[in-house]
Image (tube, rainbow, N blue to C red):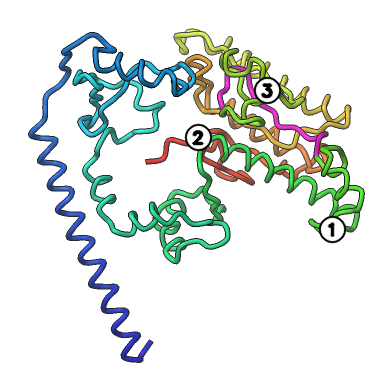
Amino acid sequence: LSSAPAAEMIGAAVAEKAAVRALSARAVSTAAAVATEEGGGISMKTKVPGPVGLRLMEQHGPQGASGGAISLFCDYRASDGCYLVDADGNRMLDMFSQIASLPLGYNHPSLLAAQADPLLATYSTSRCAIGLMPPMELPELLDETFLKIAPAGLSRVQTMLCGSSANENVFKAAMFAYRAKQRAKAGRGPTDFTRDELESCMVNQSPGCANDLSILSFRGGFHGRTMAALTCTHSKPVHKLDAPAFDWPTADFPALQYPLEHHAAENAAEEARCVDGARAIFEARLAEGRPVVGLIIEPILSEGGDLHASPSFFASLQRLCGEWREDGGAGPERMPLHGCDCEKVSSTPRLSWMRCRLA
């Protein structure tokens, strides 16, 4: 790095970063000025959907109509903050926030500033196979983002495309870990596969496919619409009708009574019942030779209803997982997986993941 060419490269990189920061600052200023100029609150000009929205629906119909669930077409360039503007210019207070995936609202100045970075344009136009050939900036990006908020003891990051794919892959990770433990007990390496495993997996059969393993989920939960994630989803029938599902167990989620302070004893009993139910499922599946290797749960079940539980309930589930060894027997080791959808419930999980809602 002491050579002249290297010094020039470093100098150029420093200059480029300074230029990007200046450009980002200008973008923030411009975005803030636009938001201030537009200002205003709710402003309704037509019915919803209005004439333009109805015309767009008619045009989109022959294209498939996005499955028929569209409520309105939106003008996202005109939307800002917590206000959504539709195709007819109606400005509405948005309580939905794109399934809670826009915690900072529309066209946030800081996010617009980030878009001004030329590196983002490069990433957008030259999409990489990130698992094989990631961009040179990836380690620094991970240090500055995900690893800043990583739970204690977790230092590895695997990014995924969406919420469902995050869940699908963490399910696989749990099962891979379980199988690796089984092979270790048989004196084999984690990937020391037998011929029977190699051949049977190609026709979706055991022992190559882990058809005997399962993930425990809870009634009312929503975890996605891909195959395994949908198996763990129990919020609305319309999500699951006509779709095949894995033979995985479902446990009860507590149905608390309110006000909480008036029903402390009843709610404690209800949560204990649900924890005991989960334990019974662990025991029954193990006896059947179909062990549970992980569980998935949301801190708040929203799509299946506004369902809550106390911190002690989630801690009890974590302890329950800690009671089971990797072979399913009682013991001090943790199960291969205990995590939850959107938020961890323990400071010491073996695996933890966030399905969505990252800003």
- Tell me the tag on residue 344: none
Q: Is residue 251 left or right of residue 76?
A: right
Residue type indicated by callout 2: Cys
Secondary structure beneath label 3: helix
**The N terminus, quarter of image:** bottom left
Q: Earlier in the sequence, mark 1 or mark 3?
A: 1
Return the residue found at the far left. 37
Q: Is residue 261 left or right of residue 227?
A: left
Q: Residues within 10 Å of mark 3 (few under 14, many from 20)?
A: many
Q: Which residue is mark 1?
A: 192
Q: In terms of depth relative to the viewer, which is nearer, 258 or 59?
A: 59
The residue at 90%/58% (across/down) is: 187
Disc 3 versus disc 2: nearer the observer:
2
User: Image quadrant of residue 286?
Assistant: top right
Reply above or below: 305 against 193.
above
| Prevailing SS of the magenta stretch | loop
Disc 1 versus disc 3: nearer the observer:
1
Q: Is residue 243 left or right of residue 139?
A: right
Residues in magenta? 210-223
Q: In terms of depth relative to the viewer, which is nearer, 80 or 296?
A: 80
Q: Earlier in the sequence, mark 2 or mark 1?
A: 1
Picture coordinates of residue 216, whole percent (x, y): 69, 28
Q: Which residue is mark 3?
A: 275
Q: In terms of depth relative to the viewer, which is nearer, 224 or 67?
A: 67
Residue type indicated by callout 1: Asp
- Tell me the tag on residue 342: 2
The residue at 90%/53% (across/down) is: 194
Reply above or below: 266 against 91.
above
